[in-house]
Image (tube, helix red, strand yellow):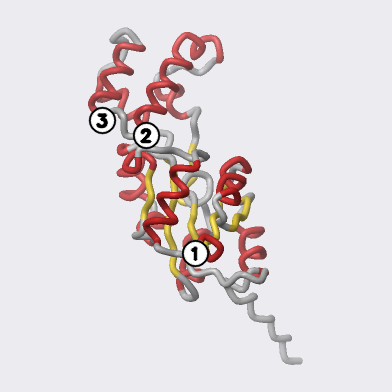
Amino acid sequence: MANVISTVIFDLGRVMVNIDFDAFPNALALSTPESRAPYRSAAAAHGRLYETGRLSTDEFIDRLFDVFHGRYTRDHLLFAWNEIIRDDVPGMTGIIERVQARCATAMLSNTSAAHFEKAERECATVRKITRRFLSFEIGAAKPSPEIYRHVIRELHEDPAQLLFIDDLQENIDAALEAGMNGLLFTDPACLERDLTQWNIIPPPSPVSPLPR
């Protein structure tokens, strides 16, 4: 671990915040693969456009309204879409605070305007980090090289001093291709050990033996 890390960049979903993709169709009472199949590809395609800023929230919901042939109100569609965002990943708030005691932090996420608004409102982990790189604002999404170049340019840092944490290997691979460092996230305990090895957070204090 020769590089000195100046900024640790966290992914949002499934790193800082729990997400549940099934919550969207479940909130529409589409609980089986058969009931979801007629809508899945079209909804996903519009979702990708929304997450890269090519649709506003109103335009996205209008497209979902058409996909589902007016079966749900627009308000209910927005509610169902936001159900994907759940709560903080336990333990991550403390890890972020410990990282911030040593170096700068940022977040890099493929997300939509509505999802980010809910996450910021309801999740303490999100409010801990004020430097945000969001796909719907940038107009590109991981693992596109463009989004990593944007982050490096905006941070004015040597990419070798940036450490990116994500739960998908393809996103880590793209960060490495851009010259950044990467850690694949599996759970907070493993991340804590990895960050200790990188000398970003100190190892836990040894437990003193109880007096006899």
Picture coordinates of residue 29 (x, y %)? 43, 18
Amino acid at dot 3: Ser
Question: Would you place residue 32 above or below residue 183 in this image?
Answer: above
Q: Which residue is mark 3?
A: 56
Left or right, 5 with respect to 50, comes to right
**How crowded is the residue under tag 2: few (<14 C-alpha within 10 Å), some, or many (20+)?**
many
- Marks counted in the figure total 3
Could you tell me how far apart the alpha carbons at marks 3 and 2 are, in whole angstroms? 10 Å
For the point 32% across and 34% down, the residue is 53
For the point 31% across and 29% down, the residue is 54
- Secondary element at image label 1: loop
**How crowded is the residue under tag 3: few (<14 C-alpha within 10 Å), some, or many (20+)?**
some
Q: Which mark is residue 158?
A: 1
> Can you say which quadrant of the picture contains the C terminus?
bottom right
> Can you say which quadrant of the picture contains the N terminus?
bottom right
Q: Nearer the viewer, mark 3 or mark 1?
A: 1
Quarter of the image where one finds residue 114: top left
Nearer-N-terminus badge (3/1): 3
Amino acid at dot 1: Asp
Nearer-N-terminus badge (2/1): 2
Amino acid at dot 2: Thr
Q: Which residue is mark 2?
A: 52
